[in-house]
Image: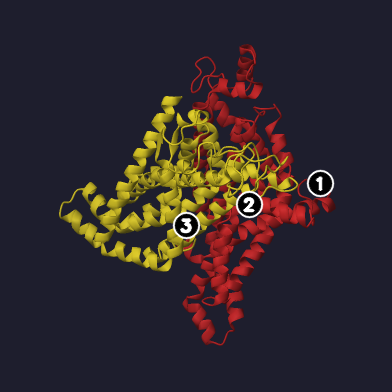
Chain colours: A red, B yellow
Amino acid sequence: MLAYIVRRTAYGFVVVLGVLLLLFALFFLYAEPVEMARRAVGEKAPPEVLEQWVVNHGYAKPTWWNAEAPGDTMIADHFRSMLTFDFGRSDSDDSPILGRIRAGMGPSLSLTLPLFAFGLVFGVGLSLFVAYFRETYIDRMGVVLCVLGMSLSVLLYIIGGQFLIGKLLRWFPISGFDPSPGVMMRFLALPVLVGLAEGLGGSIRFYRTVFIEETGRDYVRTARAKGCGDGRIMARHVLHNAMIPILTRVVVSIPFLFQGSLLLESFFGIPGLGSMMVDAINGNDFATLRAMVFIGALLFIGAQILTDIAYTLVDPRVRLS
Amino acid sequence: MNEALLEAHIVSNLIVAALLVGAALAFTAARRSVLWSRAGRELLRRRPIALVTILVFVMVALLDSVAWVGGGGTEDAIALEQSRPRSLIDRMFAPDFKEKSYSAPLADAEFYGGSKLEHPGTHLLGTDILGRDVLHLTLKGARVALLIGGLTSLIVIPLALLMGISAGYFGGRIDDIVFFVVSTLASIPSLLLLIALIMALGRGPVQVCIAMGVTGWVGFCRIVRGETFKLRELDYVQAARALGVSEIGIILRHILPNLMHLVVITFVLLFSGLVLSEAILSYLGIGIDGSWGQMIDQARDELARDPIIWWNLFAASTALFVLILSVNFVGDAVRDILDPKTLGGE
C-alpha cells in the first residue's frame, strides 16, 4: 500500500514537470516578449520603456543556457518560481500574484462550496429518484429534461437567471459581493442558484446511469428475494455500491472549488480567482495566467492521486491488482 | 487584403466540393456494409426529426460556404459590397438590406427615435445595434458552429487514432510516451488549458480550433488505446500475424475498421461540447467572429436596457439550443445503436 502511494506520487511529480514544460513552451517560446510589453505598457511607449519592461519581467534572459551565470535562464526561473510558489508580479499591473491568489480564494470558495454541496445532494438525490422509477414516464421525462438542460449554453443560464430572478422578480441583487456573512448570502444566492441549474442536467444523467447499472446486478435481486423493499434497496445497497463513480466525480471536482467559476464570478461581480483569470485574459497578463494554470493542474493532479488511493480504500478488489 | 479574401472564399468553395464528394463516398461505402446500413436505418427510425434538423443546419452552412464575387444588384451604392465575395445565403438578402440601428422584428420604424426604416416590415427578426439583419447573422452562425465542430474533429480524430493505436498496438516505450503526454494534458483543467493555448497561439478561428483539438483528443485517445489493446489479442488478429501480414496491414485492415463505430460516436458527442465551449470563449473575448456565442455575448447588455431588446439573444440562443439539442439526441441514439457497452456512463 505504502509502495503504491509512493509510486503514484512520484509519477504525479513527473506529470507536474511535464505541465511546467508545456507552460514554458506556450508562454516563453511561442509568445513574443516585445509584443507582450507593448500590450502591457501601451502601443506608443518608447523602445527604452519596452525594453525595461522586458528586463524587469524576466523575459530578456537567455532561454535555455547562460554560460556566465548558470541557472540564470528563463527556463530555470520558470521552474524555480513555479515550484516554490514564488509567482512574482503580474504582467499587466505589477501586483504580486500570490497575494492576489490568497485574496481571491475566500470569495471563490464562498461561491463554489455551497454550489458543490447542493449540487452533490440534489444530483444524487434526484437521480436516485429517477432511477427508482426507471422504465416509467417519470424516468423518460427526467432524461429528456436533462438533455434539454444540457443543451443550453451556460451564458444563457446566467443571462436568463439575472434577468428573471434579479430584474423581473427582484428576489436577489443582480451582482456584487460583500464579505460580511449576512449580506454575502444575499449576493451569493443568485449565482449559486444559476450554477446549480446549469450543472444539474449533466450530473443527474451521470448518476442515473451509474445507479441503473447497479440495479441490474445480482445483489439487488438477492436483496429483493429476501424481502427488502425497493426504497431500502436504492438507499442502502445501490447507493453504497455506487460509491466509486460518485467518489471519483467528487474528488476530481475538488480542484475546481479553489479555482472558482470563471463565468459565474465575472458575471456576478464576485472578486474571486475566476474573475482574476478573466482579467488576466483581457489584460494579456501571461504571468498570472501561467500561475493560475499551474495551480489548477497541481490541484488536479493531487486530486487524481487522492482518487486512486481512495479507490483502494473503498474497493478491496482494486488493492489486489 | 482583397487577394486574401479572394483566396479564402475559393478555399471555402473547394472545401464544400470536397465535403460533398466525401459524404457521397461515405454514403456508398456505408450502403455496402450490412452493419452501417442497418445502423443508419435504425437511427433514422429513432430520431427522424433531430436528423432532419441537423441536415437543415448543415445545408445552411454549406450554402453559406459557397461564395463568389459580383452579380446581384446594379446600384452604385453597393459597388463596395460587390467587390467582396458573397455566399448563397448572403445573396438571399439584398446587399443594402441594412438599417442604422436597432429595430424590432417586422417593425416599420427604428427602435430608438422612431425614424422610418429603409426596409419597413421586412426584418423578420429585427436588426442589431449596427442595423444588420438578425436573421441573416443567425443563418451565418450555422457555418461557424459547424466549422468549430468539423475542423476541430479533423484535428482530434486523426491525432487520437494515430496516438491511441500506436500506444495500444505496439505497447512498450511508445505506450509509455503516449501515456505520459496524455496524462500531462489531462492533468490541466480543460478550460484553463484551452485559454492558455489560445492566449499563446493568438486569436482567430483556426487557432481556436487547434486549441480545442489539442484539449479534446486526450479523452478519445484513451478510449482508442484501450480498445486497440483488446483488439490485438483477438484470434483473427493473431491469425493474421501468423500468416505474415505486416503490422501496418493488420492495423489498417483489422484494427481501424473495428474502431470506426467509436469514431462516429465520439464525433457526435464531441460536437455539442465544442460548440458550447466556443460560446464560453466568446464571452471571454477569445471566441470566433460571427458565432452564436458572440451574438449572445453582445446581447447580454441589451436585456438591461429599458425597453429590453430581446430578438438578438432570442435568435442566437434558439439556433444554438436547437442545434445542440438535435445533436445530443442523435448522439445518444448513435451510442445506443452502435455501442451500448464500451463507452458506458456519460
Task: Tally the numbered discs.
Answer: 3
Alpha carbons under labels 2 and 3: distance apart? 18 Å
Q: B321 or B136: which is nearer to us?
A: B136
Contact between labelled residues 3 and 2, with CB atoms less than 8 Å apart:
no
Mark carried by residue A179: 1
- The amino acid type found where label 1 is placed reads Pro
Q: Chain of mark 1?
A: A
* Residue B184 visible in the current orientation: no
Q: Name the residue located 37 percent from the left edge and 63 percent from the top edge.
A: B338
Mark carried by residue B327: 3
Q: A18 or B292: which is nearer to us?
A: B292
Alpha carbons under labels 1 and 3: distance apart? 43 Å
Asked if badge 1 and badge 3 are on a common chain, one would say no
Q: Mark 3: which secondary structure?
A: helix
- The amino acid type found where label 2 is placed reads Leu
Q: Chain of mark 3?
A: B
